[in-house]
């Protein structure tokens, strides 16, 4: 019996071994059948791809790089000759510029470009910034210095000469799309859709740019950007006796000639009837001459523009008053829940509005329709705030209404017919609008002109100081985050938190000292508030004296009107010193946004 059992066990073991051997043979055979990935010579593939673009058809090169091969090689030669871009052991100038142009031409991610030419994301990021800085330094070759001679476009025209014989060009601001981190998007959201930067440009009448200041947040007013351009070292300057044409937003000042306010200005406004007085005739000729800068911007934006597919096709959505009310209420609640970071709502908030409107009104509403409606709301809010700041208009806080007399009403409506719906009428849902479309204040910390780029120090790879570009911002942020967390102690072994603790005590002492001084100044100012009547002539002179601090005349005129309506506040303003007056003005203008 034992022998039989032993034989059975041995037979079972032999069977298992035979099955195992069979399985191993099968697996080996299957491995041999699986195809292996072919070997790829990355350097050869990269060179072949670049050559296929640069040495193929001219149309193919334009489609890929947005320029012809001869222009590409000329750009590479210029950047190399001026030593703005240098070849390295790992990458030639041709490849560096190729990467740069392909990314900005198609708005692709660094990682996408890296996979296409077999480069790492970090490598593409680094060389992109090098070429970007090099291209920015070409401003001296691209921006022509102005001429002080009378332009032939004026000299040879009876309409403009001799009235504009000292005019050397026109200035204006334009909004350019900007991709920025979420935490600062509020400052870049102005009256335009999405996040933009406000770019100031001066242009001659032969469509040559003579000055450019880019980087100001989209919420900044044009006059604020212009004041910054004047204040910069090597910034915007105007020859003595000469002037530029500007729109009404800049106001009249030395070197800037603006049109008459509350008078027809745009060319289309004269299509029905010709000018009826000297002011309208001046505005017509001013507008005809200043369209030069609009043409200049149009040419640049046409070169930069790319076709965009419209979401939702050609469908039109009609917003009824109940829908408008529901949208404002839902978005107000969403803002209270924290779903409005940096003054822009999350996508889920727009989807919620679309869902509720679809359910309650039996219509097909999509989130894109809600986003489009937000543009209208921002335009409405901008108009309301502009009217509130204008001279001659008051504000009834209880009724939420912009007030004005009959004469001012007629003048405003004659110049802007659509403004009638905001004057002497209660503004429905004003508080909700303030919450839904309110925005942050621009600081101008990102603004740069060509001189600023040229004077920036180069750091190692000639590009580490660039902030963020295109839609690749999060990749740069990730890299910086890794570097910031590499070490937590100093070279001597002392924890950084200890050093911060020691420094904090010193900072606290200085802050308390400054706070004490400020409280003393405020207390002294409060004592003067109720002493004697307000001398409005003195008040006007003191307010306008703040132009030296960078405020425009229009802004200060609005502040003066507000002080005249509030006598107690006016006495407090007169009692303050220059620094406290500046703090008050900043707070007032911020509250009006």
Image (cartoon, rainbow, N blue to C red):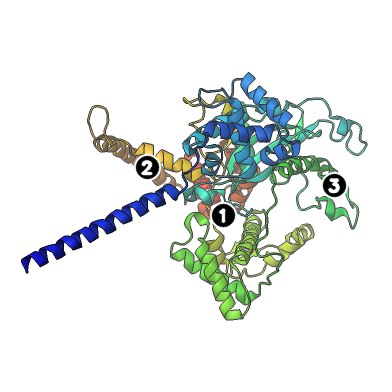
Please report contact status of discs 1 and 3: CB closer than 8 Å, yes or no. no
Which badge, 3 or 2, is on the more N-terminal residue? Answer: 3
Q: Residue at x 58, y 54 (%)?
A: 562
State which quarter of the image contains the N terminus: bottom left
Point out residue 173 in the picture as x, y percentages from the top left corner.
Answer: 68, 43
Q: Nearer the viewer, mark 2 or mark 1?
A: 1
Query: How packed is label 2: few (under 14 Cα within 10 Å), some, or many (20 or more)?
Result: few
Label ID, residue 52 = none
Q: Residue at x 53, y 57 (%)?
A: 344
* Mark 3, secondary structure of its residue: helix
Say left or right for 38 vs 380.
left
The residue that mark 3 highlights is: 284
Point out residue 502 in the picture as x, y percentages from the top left corner.
Answer: 25, 35
The residue that mark 1 highlights is: 592
State which quarter of the image contains the C terminus: bottom right
Please report contact status of discs 2 and 1: CB closer than 8 Å, yes or no. no
Which badge, 1 or 3, is on the more N-terminal residue? Answer: 3
**How far is mark 1 from mark 3, CA to CA?**
32 Å
Please report contact status of discs 3 and 2: CB closer than 8 Å, yes or no. no
Point out residue 209 in the picture as x, y percentages from the top left corner.
Answer: 73, 33
Query: Visible in this render: residue 474?
Result: yes
**How far is mark 2 from mark 1, CA to CA?**
28 Å
The residue that mark 2 highlights is: 520
Q: Residue at x 19, y 59 (%)?
A: 13
Query: Visible in this render: residue 129?
Result: no
In depth, the one of 122 and 248 nearer the eye is 122
Say left or right for 173 vs 532.
right
State which quadrant residue 538 falls in. Answer: top right
* Mark 1, secondary structure of its residue: helix
Query: How packed is label 1: few (under 14 Cα within 10 Å), some, or many (20 or more)?
Result: few
In depth, the one of 33 and 98 nearer the eye is 33
């Amino acid at each position: 019996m034992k022998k039989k059992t032993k034989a059975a066990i041995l037979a079972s073991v032999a069977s298992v071994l035979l099955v195992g051997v069979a399985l191993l043979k099968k697996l080996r055979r299957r491995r041999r059948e699986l195809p292996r990935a072919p070997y790829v010579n990355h350097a050869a593939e990269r060179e072949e791809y670049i050559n296929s673009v640069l040495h193929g058809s001219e149309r193919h090169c334009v489609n890929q790089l947005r320029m012809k091969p001869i222009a590409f090689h000329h750009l590479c030669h210029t950047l190399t000759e001026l030593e703005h871009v240098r070849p390295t052991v790992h990458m030639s100038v041709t490849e560096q510029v190729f990467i740069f142009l392909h990314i900005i031409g198609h708005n692709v991610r660094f990682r996408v470009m890296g996979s296409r030419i077999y480069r790492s994301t970090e490598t593409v990021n680094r060389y992109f910034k090098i070429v970007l800085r090099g291209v920015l330094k070409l401003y001296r070759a691209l921006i022509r210095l102005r001429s002080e001679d009378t332009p032939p476009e004026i000299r040879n025209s009876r309409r403009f000469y001799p009235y504009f014989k000292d005019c050397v060009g026109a200035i204006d601001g334009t909004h350019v799309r900007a991709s920025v981190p979420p935490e600062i998007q509020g400052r870049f959201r102005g009256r335009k859709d999405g996040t933009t930067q406000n770019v100031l440009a001066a242009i001659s009448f032969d469509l040559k740019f003579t000055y450019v200041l880019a980087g100001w947040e989209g919420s900044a007013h044009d006059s604020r950007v212009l004041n910054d351009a004047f204040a910069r070292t090597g910034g915007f300057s105007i020859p003595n006796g000469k002037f530029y044409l500007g729109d009404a937003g800049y106001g009249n000042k030395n070197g800037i000639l603006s049109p008459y306010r509350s008078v027809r200005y745009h060319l289309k406004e004269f299509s029905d009837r010709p000018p009826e007085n000297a002011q309208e005739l001046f505005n017509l000729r001013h507008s005809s001459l200043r369209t030069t800068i609009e043409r200049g911007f149009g040419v640049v934006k046409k070169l930069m523009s790319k076709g965009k597919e419209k979401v939702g096709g050609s469908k039109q959505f009609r917003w009824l008053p109940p829908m408008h009310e529901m949208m404002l209420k839902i978005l107000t609640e969403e803002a209270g829940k924290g779903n409005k970071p940096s003054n822009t709502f999350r996508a889920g908030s727009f989807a919620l509005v679309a869902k509720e409107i679809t359910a309650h009104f039996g219509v097909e509403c999509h989130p894109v329709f809600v986003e489009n409606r937000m543009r209208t709301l921002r335009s409405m809010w901008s108009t309301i705030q502009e009217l509130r700041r204008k001279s001659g208009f008051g504000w009834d806080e209880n009724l939420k209404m912009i007030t004005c007399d009959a004469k001012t009403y007629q003048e405003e409506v004659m110049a802007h017919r659509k403004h009638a719906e905001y004057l002497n009428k209660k503004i429905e849902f004003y508080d909700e609008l303030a919450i839904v479309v309110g925005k942050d204040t621009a600081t101008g910390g990102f603004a740069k002109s060509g001189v600023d780029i040229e004077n920036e120090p180069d750091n190692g790879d000639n590009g580490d100081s660039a902030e963020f570009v295109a839609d690749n911002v999060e990749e740069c942020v990730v890299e910086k985050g890794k570097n910031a967390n590499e070490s937590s102690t100093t070279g001597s072994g002392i924890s950084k938190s200890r050093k911060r603790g020691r420094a904090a005590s010193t900072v606290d002492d200085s802050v308390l000292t400054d706070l004490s001084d400020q409280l003393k100044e405020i207390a002294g100012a409060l004592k003067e508030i109720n002493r004697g009547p307000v001398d409005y002539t003195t008040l006007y002179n003191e307010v306008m004296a703040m132009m030296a601090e960078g405020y425009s005349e229009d802004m200060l005129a609005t502040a003066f009107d507000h002080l005249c309506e509030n006598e107690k506040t006016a006495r407090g303003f007169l009692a303050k010193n220059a620094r406290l007056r500046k703090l008050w003005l900043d707070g007032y203008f911020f509250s009006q946004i």
